[in-house]
Image (tube, rainbow, N blue to C red):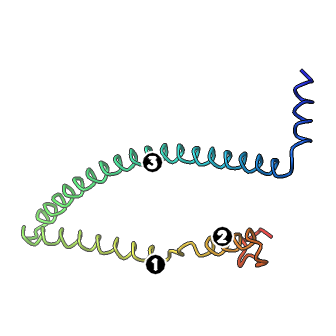
Amino acid sequence: MAEPTTRGQSDMSRASLGDLVALAVSDLSQLVKCEVDLAKQELKQDARRLGAGGALLGVAAFAGCLVLVLLCFAYAYGLQAAGIWPWAAFLIAAGTCVLLAGGAIAIGFAKFRGLSGLRRTRSTVSGDLALIRRDGGAPTARLPGKS
């Protein structure tokens, strides 16, 4: 059993530096290929889960819309029972829905306005690429707590 190990060591000692570099490069490319394959498999699983979750959220949103319509009818009939004319009660219910939608739109725009566009990530990645290329450039920004 010890002989194949010593034979492999003697083959490695006789190998040139170019052969060793070629072996290291092929091992590295195989490692990268395996990592990419693993990432593809994980992304496929995540996409399936995301699709199923999205479909269920769509069903829930549709049911929520039906409930909202029923609540608007109940609200309008409740206003009518309180003594408001039927046409005015339905206009009030519709106006309330429009106000709720406008508030949701305003909150949504405020949230979108706060997006950063991955500024910190882009700056750290460009700094890391500069270090890899050995341009002598230091990273432009560091994450808090990292040195």
State whether residue 29 is above or below residue 92: above
Residue depth check, mark 3 versus mark 2: number of the one nearer the observer:
2
Q: Which mark is residue 76?
A: none
Q: CA distance from mark 2 to mark 1?
A: 24 Å
- Horizontally, is 126 left or right of 146 in the view? left
Q: Amino acid at mark 1?
A: Arg
Q: Residues within 10 Å of mark 2 (few under 14, many from 20)?
A: some
Q: Residues within 10 Å of mark 1 (few under 14, many from 20)?
A: few
Which sits earlier in the primary sequence, circle 2 or circle 1? 1
State whether residue 6 is above or below residue 22: above
Residue drawn at x 15%, y 59% as measured from the top left = 73
Front residue (pair 1, 19): 19
- Horizontally, is 65 left or right of 49 in the view? left
Residue drawn at x 59%, y 44% as measured from the top left = 38
Which residue was labeled with disc 3?
47
State whether residue 3 is above or below residue 19: above
Front residue (pair 61, 20): 20
Which residue was labeled with disc 1?
113
Residue depth check, mark 1 versus mark 3: number of the one nearer the observer:
3
Which residue was labeled with disc 2?
125
Determine the image quadrant of residue 11.
top right
State whether residue 112 is above or below residue 33: below
Query: Which percent across, then down, holds residue 135?
Result: 76, 77
Q: Secondary structure at mark 3?
A: helix
Quarter of the C terminus within the rendering:
bottom right
Q: Amino acid at mark 2?
A: Val
Front residue (pair 62, 82): 62
Query: Which percent across, then down, holds residue 31?
Result: 68, 46
Q: Secondary structure at mark 2?
A: helix
Query: Which percent across, then down, holds residue 54?
Result: 37, 50
